[in-house]
Image (cartoon, grey):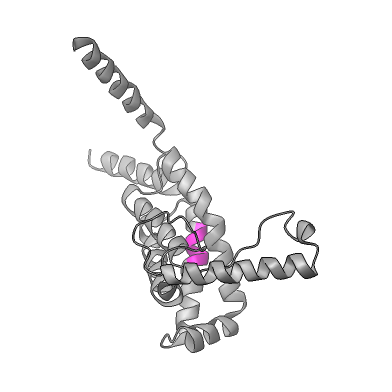
């Protein structure tokens, strides 16, 4: 029993030592998310008329031009903030709002999964009917391609699927941003860290 306890304590102590590099977690999230948001924001801003038309006609959002502009700026500027690690805890808030709006308007009616997974990865998928329908259409598409096309060439770089377009990606990005909201940009690798460190040093010196 004592041996097990010592081993357990040693393992916990070893894991605790990883806190010296705890900045790697936020850094990895920032590197992963930054290009996604920068590209998404740039596409919205560079085609603002088309984006506003989609927001108004297909999503039914009020003031579609304003909403398109705000969404594009939140994603593009927020993506740059992710790269630099500056003002991050503030910038992730409009980015999270954008993800929540996207999930609730563009994807909610399609359920959770982005693809029609026959084996559900979550128990809360509420549109299993779309999965069944997508599988039926996928089988038809495959049979048509096999009959009338070079199926082996068409699927050489990836299999055929039907996009279900649920909230999965938007929800995942929201959760990742939520983590950054609480953790911040991380030590050493962010401008937030160095600005705060300089400010605290200057404040301590001025208080002497």
Q: Residue drawn at (46%, 63%), measured in percent from left and top?
A: 113
The residue at the far left in this view is 1
Q: Residue drawn at (47%, 41%), measured in percent from left and top?
A: 189
Say which of 203 and 197 sits in front. 197
> Hey, which quadrant is residue 45 in on the image?
bottom right
Q: Give the vertical position of 11 relative to 96 (above or below).
A: above
Q: Give the vertical position of 104 relative to 1 (above or below).
A: below
Say which of 142 and 98 sits in front. 142
Residue 110: x and y in percent read: 44, 72
Q: Quadrant of the N terminus?
A: top left
Q: Is residue 73 visible?
A: no
Residue 179: x and y in percent read: 35, 51
Q: Is residue 48 magenta?
A: no
Residue 191: x and y in percent read: 45, 48
- 29 relative to 8 in the view: left or right: right
Say which of 20 and 204 sits in front. 20
Number of numbered tags placed on the structure image:
0
Over which residues does the magenta segment extend?
Answer: 75-80
Q: Is residue 11 visible?
A: yes
The residue at the far top in this view is 3
């Amino acid at each position: 029993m004592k041996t097990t306890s010592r081993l357990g304590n040693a393992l916990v102590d070893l894991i605790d030592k990883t806190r010296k590099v705890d900045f790697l977690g936020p850094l990895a999230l920032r590197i992963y998310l930054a290009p996604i948001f920068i590209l998404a924001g740039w596409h919205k801003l560079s085609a603002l008329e088309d984006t506003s038309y989609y927001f108004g006609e297909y999503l039914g959002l009020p003031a579609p031009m304003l909403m398109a502009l705000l969404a594009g700026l939140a994603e593009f500027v927020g993506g740059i903030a992710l790269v630099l690690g500056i003002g991050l805890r503030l910038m992730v808030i409009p980015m999270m709002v954008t993800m929540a709006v996207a999930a609730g308007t563009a994807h909610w009616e399609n359920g959770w999964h982005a693809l029609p997974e026959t084996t559900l990865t979550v128990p809360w998928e509420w549109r299993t009917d779309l999965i069944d329908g997508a599988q039926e259409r996928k089988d038809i598409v495959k049979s048509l391609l096999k009959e009338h096309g070079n199926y082996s060439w068409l699927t050489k770089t990836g299999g055929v699927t039907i996009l279900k377009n649920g909230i999965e990606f938007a929800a995942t990005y929201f959760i990742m941003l939520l983590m950054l909201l609480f953790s911040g940009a991380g030590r050493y690798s962010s401008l937030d860290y160095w600005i705060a460190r300089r400010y605290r040093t200057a404040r301590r010196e001025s208080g002497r």
